[in-house]
Amino acid sequence: MLGVLLARAGVRVMLLEKHADFLRDFRGDTIHPSTMQVLHELGWLEEFLQLPHTPVRKLSGQFGDQTVMVADFSHLPVAAPFVAMMPQWDFLNFLARKGSAYPSFTLRMRAQARELIVENERVVGVRADGPDGPFDIRAGLIVAADGRTSVLRDASALPNEDLGAPMDVLWFRLPRHASDTDETQGRFDAGRISIMLNRGDYWQCAFVIPKGNNDRVRAAGLEAFRTSVASVLPFEAERANAIASFDDVKLLTVQVNRLKTWWRSGFLCIGDAAHAMSPVGGVGVNLAVQDAVAAANLLAKPLRSNTLTDADLQAVQQRREWPTSMTQRLQLVMQDNIIAPALTATGELKPPAMLRLVGAVPWLARFPARIIGLGVRPEHISPAMLPQN
């Protein structure tokens, strides 16, 4: 998103993607109203919504035998008042196509940045590996948007603060039948939490486990894992047998952290490279997009004029640090008051008091919808980001 916006504003951009395509399974699939509002401001929303997606206008959760409303997006004052469930690779391909319309945008696939080039305490480029061997790129600004395991962030030696998470997530697929519901499934039982995302002909499933329990789950054996999965399925238990081996089960190590400083001279981190988010609320992708919009708004002009200073990079962090920290604080509250108690519960599980109140007073569901759907201080495309002649 940042590369497309800067190229749209007339800045020369080279984007490196280490894979040959964007087809990665088990990535975030929620495109929130805040992101679609940015697409609307760019005039791209109608085209975007032509891609296959499932609109989610309300979120609910099942705690034991009780189902409670969590969020109602339908009242949000935006062009698309819902969450679009869409494979992330479709979103990334959409942005890549938009970027290709600008002559100053270059996307290099199978190109992995591995090291920063530093001269006189300033980052001036990256060393990368490509299909034809290693190569260097020099630029006025290097942006690390390479996720929670960011190679470039680690190379920058910027200090990182770990905020903690009580869980990890095991991802796998189960077949989906035509008679199944279309709705995203979320279920909380004593010692077990599961999420199921509709992917058309299959369900992408998340099975939440206590932090660090992956080896214990695998040591207990495949049949025990299938039995645990079957106990939370909204359909016949036998479908869990589609998990043929633990090779079908991928581990997401959940992190919640934030860089104390997101930048150094010539270098900036955004998205999960700057602040790994909890999967609570599915907001990570959308926080990253908000970072990209803010960075484009603030940096396009100095990049075009080759006048970028450290103060410009600091301004990006100042703009985005408070919304990020507030979102992470809310995620930590949810982790401590909903996730952790569910994972450690041994008896009948009931909805937390805050969710029972939302369920009892339906209009209260608009407040979590705003936090999840729009976030804290959503970003908008600045008039300064209009295409340059």
Image (cartoon, helix red, strand yellow):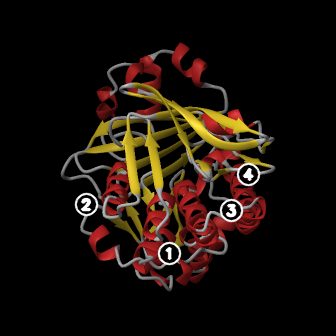
Give the crowd class for mark 3: few <14, some 14-19, many >=20 residues within 10 Å. some
First reached walking from the N terminus: tag 2 or tag 1: 2
* Residue named by callout 1: 72
Disc 4 element: loop
* Residue named by callout 4: 262
Across and down, in percent, residue 360 comes to: 60, 76
* Residue named by callout 3: 308
- Could you give the CA–CA distance between mark 1 and mark 4, rounded to whole angstroms? 34 Å
- Could you give the CA–CA distance between mark 2 and mark 1, rounded to whole angstroms? 22 Å
The kind of residue tagged 1 is Asp
Across and down, in percent, residue 267 comes to: 68, 49
The front one of 24 and 245 is 24
Residue 80 seen anywhere in this rendered image of the structure: no
Disc 1 element: strand
The kind of residue tagged 3 is Leu
First reached walking from the N terminus: tag 3 or tag 2: 2
The kind of residue tagged 4 is Trp
Which mark is nearer the camera, 3 or 1? 3
Q: Which mark is residue 388?
A: none
